[in-house]
């Protein structure tokens, strides 16, 4: 029965007349008469309040479900102000990574994970390598926001392409003996740190391609290789990688803004934690290259961010030696001598 309409209920229809019947009808109030005169379609004030209370409750429940089901947390692993002897985070190895690396005796990590240290490379060494990077990038930069300099292949960003820096007429004056010696020495210190942290035989750990300097700015990306901010797994990008390290040459918040290094840790289907490293000059970060360490670099919003990616493999077939740092000989020029690979992305 709708409010205020339809025949009266039987109890009203068969009511006996009282002594006062026959005179004017007494005005009787029915509990169903609140809609009289309005067509019976309008809810009472109490019902409106009840309706709104239900709507608010439903919204609150939906919000609780959303924020407990789809959550992204943030965690700072290393800030620029800290000076860290060593900070580490153990992780379970991803299955494909563990299955592959188990083939290499002496190169299997005691436990997968990541570490950061400000005590592996000195500030003076980082300063010399920064001078080396700046000297190289004076002769070529990407027209987008990401430039690379690979001392091993000679690949140097130039516009949307790459050139071989060792073929430039100025090449003989770009790098000094001090640059070369410090580069090699730092690479060995980082390799030893990776072996110590993951409990590897240092002889089983080999430098691999690509190992390169990066220069990141807020320039608009011109090619896919300028889009360094996409999440990725190094082992999937470079099949030779087993251990990745970064040596930072400039300071977050001082030399550049944005550009933090971000690990993406998944916790179930919808929850994740973004773990940040704020670059600091001479800071080294290292990690196993499997899916347990998915990551990306935030877009640089100002200034210039310099770093070196130093990559290691357990597979001797993918090992490479130190750069010869010499001009290409005439017979190489005749063969075309293009850089080994111009497709580097920032690990």
Image (cartoon, rainbow, N blue to C red):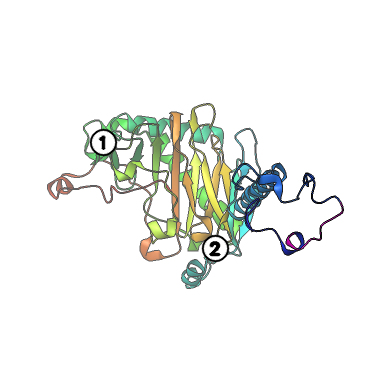
Which label sits on residue 158? 1
Magenta-highlighted residues: 13-19
Residue 15 shown in magenta: yes
Q: Earlier in the sequence, mark 2 or mark 1?
A: 1
Q: According to the image, label 2 marks what residue?
A: 201
Q: Residue at x 28, y 50 (%)?
A: 341
Q: In the drawing, does residue 337 fall left or right of residue 194?
A: left
Kind of element beneath mark 2: loop
- Residue at 35% from the left image edge and 35% from the top image edge: 145
Q: Which is in the foreground here, disc 2 or disc 1?
A: 1
Instruction: Give the side of residue 13 with respect to residue 256, left or right.
Output: right
Secondary structure mostly seen in magenta is: loop
**Residue 117 location, x and y as percent?**
60, 44
Say if 287 sits above or below 168 in the image. Answer: below
Task: Check the picture and name the quadrant holding the N terminus.
Answer: bottom right
- Tell me how many marks there are: 2
Q: Nearer the viewer, residue 89 or 121?
A: 89
Q: Looking at the rendering, which quadrant does residue 265 occupy?
A: bottom right
| Residue 69 visible in this rendered orientation of the protein | yes
């Amino acid at each position: 029965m709708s409010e205020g309409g339809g025949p009266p209920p039987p109890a009203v229809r068969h009511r006996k007349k009282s002594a006062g019947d026959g005179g004017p009808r007494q005005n009787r109030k029915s509990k169903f008469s609140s809609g009289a005169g309005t067509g019976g379609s309008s809810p009472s004030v109490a019902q409106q309040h009840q309706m709104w209370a239900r709507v608010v409750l439903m919204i609150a429940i939906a919000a609780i479900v959303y924020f407990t089901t789809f959550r992204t947390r943030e965690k700072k692993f290393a800030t620029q102000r800290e000076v860290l002897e060593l900070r580490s985070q153990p992780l379970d190895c991803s299955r494909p990574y563990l299955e592959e690396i188990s083939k290499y005796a002496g190169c299997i990590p005691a436990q997968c994970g990541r570490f950061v240290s400000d005590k592996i490379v000195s500030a003076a060494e980082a300063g010399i390598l920064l001078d080396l990077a700046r000297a190289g990038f004076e002769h070529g930069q990407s027209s987008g926001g990401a430039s690379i300099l690979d001392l091993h292949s000679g690949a140097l960003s130039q516009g949307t392409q790459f050139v071989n820096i060792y073929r430039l007429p100025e090449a003989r004056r770009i790098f000094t003996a001090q640059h070369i010696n410090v580069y090699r020495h730092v690479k060995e210190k980082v390799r030893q740190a990776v072996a110590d942290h993951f409990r590897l035989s240092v002889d089983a750990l080999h430098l691999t391609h690509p190992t390169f300097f990066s220069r990141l700015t807020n320039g608009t990306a011109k090619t896919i290789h300028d889009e360094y901010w996409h999440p990725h797994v190094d082992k999937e990008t470079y099949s030779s990688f087993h251990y990745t390290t970064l040596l930072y040459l400039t300071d977050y918040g001082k030399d550049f803004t944005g550009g933090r290094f971000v690990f993406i840790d998944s916790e179930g289907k919808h929850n994740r934690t973004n773990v940040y490293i704020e670059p600091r000059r001479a800071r080294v970060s290292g990690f196993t290259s499997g899916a347990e360490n998915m990551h990306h670099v935030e877009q640089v919003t100002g200034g210039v961010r310099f770093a070196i990616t130093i990559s290691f493999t357990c597979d001797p077939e993918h090992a490479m030696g130190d750069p010869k740092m010499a001009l290409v000989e005439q017979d190489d020029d005749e063969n075309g001598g293009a850089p080994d690979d111009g497709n580097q992305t920032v690990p």
